[in-house]
Image (cartoon, rainbow, N blue to C red):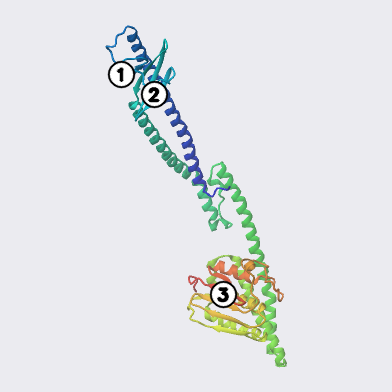
Amino acid sequence: MEFKQSLAQRIIIAFALMSALVAGAFAMGIVATVHLVEEKLISAGLGGDLQRLLLMDSVSDWSHRPEPDQLFYFSGGPGDFKLPKDLRHLEPGFHEVFREQLSYHAMVEVVDGRHYVLLQDQSDFEERERVLFAVVLVGFVLSLVLAVFLGWILARKVMAPVVRLARQVRHRDQLLGLAPPLAPDYAADEVGELAVAFDATLGRLRQALTRERLFTSDVSHELRTPLMVLASSCELLLENPGIDQRGRAQVERIARACEEMRELVQTFLMLARAQREDAGAGPQQSLAQVADGLLGLWREPIETKGLTLIFEPGNPATTCYNATLLHAVMGNLLRNALHYTERGFIRLTLTTTGFRVEDSGVGIPEEKREAMFEPFVRGGEKRGEGLGLGLSLVQRICENQGWSVSLTTMEPNGCRFQVELDSSVVG
């Protein structure tokens, strides 16, 4: 069974268990030793008293009685010295005898067939034993408390470098290229070896992140030139008076696609920088402005497919956000709804804290919902030529900007994407 306690708790528990075992063994040893020694002393004392009384018996001198806390009996003894029935079965030697509510130590001797028994009240002995047990118990409890306290102090001392290392590793700046190594801050012990391992792992992560950012930046940068050529060609074609209406509509569609792709390239460039502070460098628009622009872009393809586009403007805040990133999030959700809806509607709803995109499409099985925001994951009915990157891009942008996106199902079918925006990202 795997223990769920923290390492510090395990150290404290280990100290407590070790103290319990050592203190318990020590306490039992003390009690057993004291009990044995006191029993030997009492038996020796009783034996000496009994021998004294036997010498008196040999000279028929009974003017000396036993001690006040002693009782003396023997077989055939007169009066008070007569051996009671409950003591006749005792063998020679030392015994413990219980009579009524009292307990006695008994020493038995047999001389010429006559049994001699000397009893001594052991109330004082039992009282000393109770005091001894109380002292040992208090000492045992105090040792446990002291062990827990010392374990807590030691756990803090031992865990301090581990906790500090964990905080440094969790710190976001540790992934930056100029972040100092961790190992020099620690001794050449187990924690130092762990710091060296973290340095190596974080170094590989920094290299991978750098390669990814450079690749994304290079690809996005290189795409700008062909996109500018396409956009310029579309402008020239639209200025040609000889183009017919159908051709003009196709050129305008190409121009819109070029503009959308240009914004997507800009989105990738901004994400490659991986800095939230860069979000304020681009154009700023409110939620309503971005929604109006996207409705003009997507209304025609949605209605051409026979779907109903429903827009509920609500009462959104006037806060401005990075237009490129917000456009990419909302546009990808609308595109996703269009790809997976064959009949019914697509609804865009603006709220005071964000927006919702709902559709009456095929929906997403429950077992695939968590994976839908991962790269190259597509719905069960793969339509179009998409690679399954749209929702992954939405997730990356939301994480980068401090926004949140969630996916739920609609009844009887369809999906609902809810995006909550962080109002602290303003223009």
Say if residue 168 shows up in the picture.
yes
Q: Residue at x 62, y 77 (%)?
A: 414
Name the residue tied to disc 2: 86
Spot occupied by residue 318 in the image (x, y as percentages of width and height): 48, 79
**Mark 1: few, some, or many residues within 10 Å (few <14, many ≥20)?**
few
State the mark number for residue 326.
Answer: 3
Q: Is residue 362 above or below residue 198?
A: below
Spot occupied by residue 372 in the image (x, y as percentages of width and height): 63, 68
Mark 1 and mark 2: Cα distance apart in space: 15 Å
- Are dots 1 and 2 in contact, CB under 8 Å? no
Looking at the image, which is closer to me, 8 or 232?
Answer: 8
**Mark 3: few, some, or many residues within 10 Å (few <14, many ≥20)?**
many
Q: Secondary structure at mark 1?
A: helix
Q: Residue at x 37, y 18 (%)?
A: 117
Q: Is residue 178 above or below residue 295?
A: above
**Residue at the top extreme of this rendering:** 59
Looking at the image, which is closer to me, 222 or 301?
Answer: 301
Looking at the image, which is closer to me, 380 or 423?
Answer: 380
Q: Is residue 266 above or below residue 124?
A: below
Mark 2 and mark 3: Cα distance apart in space: 101 Å
**Residue at the left extreme of this rendering:** 63
Mark 3 and mark 1: Cα distance apart in space: 111 Å
Q: Residue at x 53, y 51 (%)?
A: 166
Q: Secondary structure at mark 2?
A: helix
Spot occupied by residue 210 in the image (x, y as percentages of width and height): 63, 60
Spot occupied by residue 183 in the image (x, y as percentages of width and height): 56, 47
Q: Please, what is the three-letter code of the amino acid marked with disc 3?
A: Leu
